[in-house]
Amino acid sequence: MAAPARTRKTASDKKSSQILTLAIDIGGTGIKAETLDESGKPVTDRHRIPTPKHATPRKVVAIIRKLARACSPFQRVSAGFPGVVKDGVIYTAANLGKGWKGFDLAAALKKKLSAPTRVTNDADIQGLGSVQGTGIELVITLGTGVGSVIFVDGHRIHLELAHHPFHKGRTYEDELGARALKKKGGKRWNRMLEEAIGDLHRMFNYDRLYIGGGNTKHIKIKLPSDVKIVSNLEGLLGGIKLWAEVERNIPPQTE
Ligand code: BGC
């Protein structure tokens, strides 16, 4: 019998031997998805469908199924959600529709997408992809809502600063969310951000503060040297890091 011909590994062989992760970002204005290889490099385009009004679990899961079809194949899923998540179950969803409290999003996606799924808070995902893993690292995100998470030597604790009083009885989200930026303008929003950075430094004594989210493009103030703007790219990497936590045997604190 003739020996099998030696074949060279093609790019698509290489792709298929990788574990591909469908990374989903559920936001207040858009739901985005793309598939990443193990190093966090996108292997598909980034697809986006606007978040519908009154975004209920049923509507959001239907959109994610559509996005997943455009991003196939993948072997596992990670999703960032704009609210409190524990063990894949949603506790709050301030900027989405009704019906989320108690909804097991991880289980629903696992079933509909036929792939193991981890779900955690969106700011936690941004943070996982951004932090160095040493010291006290605070992460905030500025988008529709205001996300927050703190890492101590790489261990994360989800925060919900968004709904805490910050300025004259108004919350961080009232002053720094997308609605405040639109209503009160960039100048005031930047002033509030400067004040918030000072407050957060006094409160957490962080070694580094990372600021992510779509509205970072409106930042005009000079940032202190321990404050860094992080991009979507780091946010994406977080989707992979969420799975790396499983491999490192980190107990599921909030997913
Ligand atoms: C939510 C947070 C979320 C943030 C950014 C806030 O309204 O309470 O959980 O991380 O928005 O989406």
Image: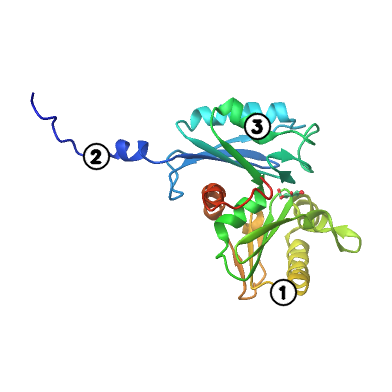
Horizontally, is 194 left or right of 1 in the view? Answer: right
Crowding at dot 3, Cα within 10 Å, few <14 / some 14-19 / many 20+, comes out as some
The amino acid type found where label 3 is placed reads: Ala
Asked if residue 23 lies left or right of residue 59, the reply is left
Sequence-wise, the earlier of marks 3 and 1 is: 3
The mark found on residue 9 in the picture is: 2
- Sequence-wise, the earlier of marks 2 and 3 is 2
Image position of 151 with respect to 76: above or below: below
Q: Residue furthest left?
A: 2
**Residues under labels 1 and 2: Cα distance?**
51 Å
Q: Is residue 67 visible?
A: yes
Q: Choose between 202 and 136: the one closer to the eye.
A: 136
Return the x and y of residue 207 as percentages of the image width and height: 64, 73
Q: At 45% across and 44% down in the image, what residue appears? A: 42
Please give the residue where the numbered disc 3 appears in the rendered image. 107
Asked whether 77 or 153 is in front, the reply is 153
Q: Which residue is mark 1?
A: 205
Few, some or many residues within 10 Å of mark 2 (<14, 14–19, 20+): few
Above or below, 220 relative to 234: below
